[in-house]
Image: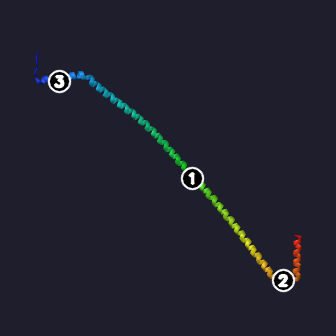
Amino acid sequence: MNLNFNPLETNLVNLAIVIGVLFWFLRGFLGGILERRRSAILQDLQDAEARLKTASEELTKAQSELAAAQQKAEQIRIDGQKRAAAIRAEGEKRTISVMAAIKQGAAADADAEASRIKDALRREAAMAAIDKVLTDLPGRLDDAAQSRLIDSTIRNLENA
């Protein structure tokens, strides 16, 4: 056996031996580490895909809920407009009925005032006629005519 003391050759042989030994002993260890790393990466990818799928489903669900909420909001807005129109129409009807009642009240007041004025005018006319008769009658009636008038009035009262 011949020993080679050449450092270049010796280092290469040593290096080859070390690499061979490392490969032989660390093959299982490094292979296990790499396999676990590969499994972890695959698991992370599967988890990410599952989260993506879940997120996509939740997004779809949220979008459908948003669409439903928008439809409901639109329906509420339409119902509100209908309700406002109904309230406005009801207010107009009440206003018209109140105006009609006021008009009827005013007409009744006007009729009552006209009737009161007519009665007052009749009384004034009657009082004026009575005053005129009282002033003119004594000069027109003599005692005989006055007696005949009284007798005629008494007979009329008895017959009535």
Amino acid at circle 2: Arg
Mark toward the start of the polypeptide (1 vs 2)? 1
**Secondary-structure class at tag 2:** helix
Amino acid at circle 3: Leu
Residue found 34% across the figure and 29% down from its top = 42
Residue contact between numbered discs 1 and 3, judged by CB atoms under 8 Å: no
Mark toward the start of the polypeptide (2 vs 3)? 3
Task: Calculate the distance from the C-alpha at mark 1 to the C-alpha at mark 2.
Answer: 80 Å
**Secondary-structure class at tag 3:** helix
The answer to whether residue 91 is left or right of residue 145 is left
Residue found 89% across the figure and 82% down from its top = 144
Q: Which residue is mark 2?
A: 140
The answer to whether residue 146 is left or right of residue 68 is right
Task: Calculate the distance from the C-alpha at mark 2 to the C-alpha at mark 3.
Answer: 174 Å
**Secondary-structure class at tag 1:** helix
Q: Which residue is mark 3?
A: 15
Q: Position of residue 63 (x, y in %)?
A: 45, 40
Image vertical order of residue 133 relative to residue 89, above or below: below
Kindly indicate the quadrant of the structure image that contains residue 9.
top left
